[in-house]
Structures are given as structure tokens and as C-alpha cells.
Image: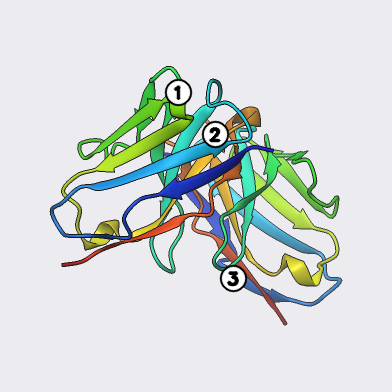
Amino acid sequence: QVQLQESGPGLVKPSETLSLTCTVSGGSINSYYWSWIRQPPGKGLEYIGYIYYSGGTNYNPSLKSRVTFSVETSKNQFSLRLTSVTAADTAVYYCARAGVADAFDIWGQGTMVTVSS
Amino acid sequence: AIQLTQSPSSLSASIGDRVTITCRTSQGIGSALAWYQQKPGKPPKLLIYDASSLESGVPSRFSGSGSGTDFTLTISSLQPEDFATYYCQQFNSYLITFGQGTRLEIK
């Protein structure tokens, strides 16, 4: 079955760039919408955006000026870059697949990213 | 952005109880609503999509209903593994949004 795995640094300094990659295994990235969602410690879920395998994107307006998604179909991976991070960006970051009826039916385990000097 | 308000924010219930969680949206979304269950340290798990469709593998004690602006998630008979936080999510607009969550605890 399809599985997702996030990878990237767990600690990022303020004002620097957060970069994460999600690897899709057990299936092809060449369909569906692939999303990033984050969850600050003890808080709720925040949608960051999605990327389609062909490269089309949709970003949360609150993050749009700082976020960029990319996809590498040959590696079955998609990535997130978030610039100029602050402590408010500290969160567990999840990648997820938008499947049937656009609901998020498959999630990665999540990776905790802390923004601190 | 479409706002989602869940109620209650938390509730205590006993094994075997019937539980209902409500999600109200700030504007009509048709049936473009999903429900998730999240346990500590784990990613959310999809329970319901399209307001009332049960995700494959999810026990039939979970059900969803509603359309427009008012939606409910019902657990017909609580089991020990159901104690978790539940989120609703709308995907009617390009900006997907989640409810604030409902924490379900053991009484």
C-alpha cells in the first residue's frame, strides 16, 4: 500500500529556510494531489498547500509569500521550502495524499521541526 | 476563508455511549467535509469523506451526516480505542481549513 515518509532537519535557526521532503512508496506520485499540513505543539491542524504531480500548486494565503513546493517524479518525492522561519513555524509537519473526494486519506508519520537558535 | 467551529471542544463519555460531535461552517460547502481521528503522537486518520461516506476499513459505528453548513460525526457505541481528538475539515474552497478539534475523554 502507499506510504509517505517525511525527511529533513529537525532544527532550523530563525530567519533561515526550512526544507522537507516527502517520499512516496508503494505507489506512483503520478496522480493525486500531494499536500503539506502542520500542527504546532498542542494545537490544531493547519493546511499549508498542495502540489499536483505535474507541478501545479495551491498555497495557504497566510504562508504564500514564504512557501514553495516542488515535485521530483523520477524519485517519487515532493518537497516543501519555507523561508524566513520564526518560532511560530515550530510544528510537526505532515505530508499527505488528497485521495477520494479530495480528503486526506494517507498521511506520513510527521516530522517535528523546531525553530530555535 | 471558511471557518469551521466544532462543538463541544471536549467531552467525557463512557464505553458504550453514543456520542455526537458537531461541525458548523461559516458558509455553505455542500457535502465537501471530512472527519479525522487523531491519537497522541500519530497522524490524523481519515474516518468520513463527502460528509457521510465511510472510509474503507473504518468501523461502522462511525457515521457522518449533514450538508450545507451543519455536520455531525456520530459514534454509536464508544470503544476504548475511540478516545482521541476528532477534527472536521472542509475542501469546498481552495483554502482547505480544519475545525479546532474535539477531545474525547474517558469518563
Question: For the residues carrying marks 1 and 3, which lies nearer the camera in this image?
Answer: 1
Place of residue A94 in the rendered image (x, y in percent of width and height, measured from the top left): 46, 49
Label 3: which secondary element: strand
Residue farthest to the top?
A54
Residue under pointer 3: B10
Query: Which chain hosts label 1?
Result: A
The residue indicated by pointer 2 is B28
Which quarter of the rendered picture does the C terminus of chain A lie within? Answer: bottom left
Image: A34 above or below B25: above
Q: Can you say which quadrant of the picture contains the N terminus of chain A? A: top right
Q: CA distance from mark 1 to mark 3?
A: 45 Å
* Contact? badges 2 and 3 (CB < 8 Å): no
Residue extending farthest left: A15
In this rendered view, identify the residue nearer to me: A113 or A35. A113
Residue wearing tag 1: A74
Quadrant of res A103: top right
Q: SS for tag 1?
A: helix
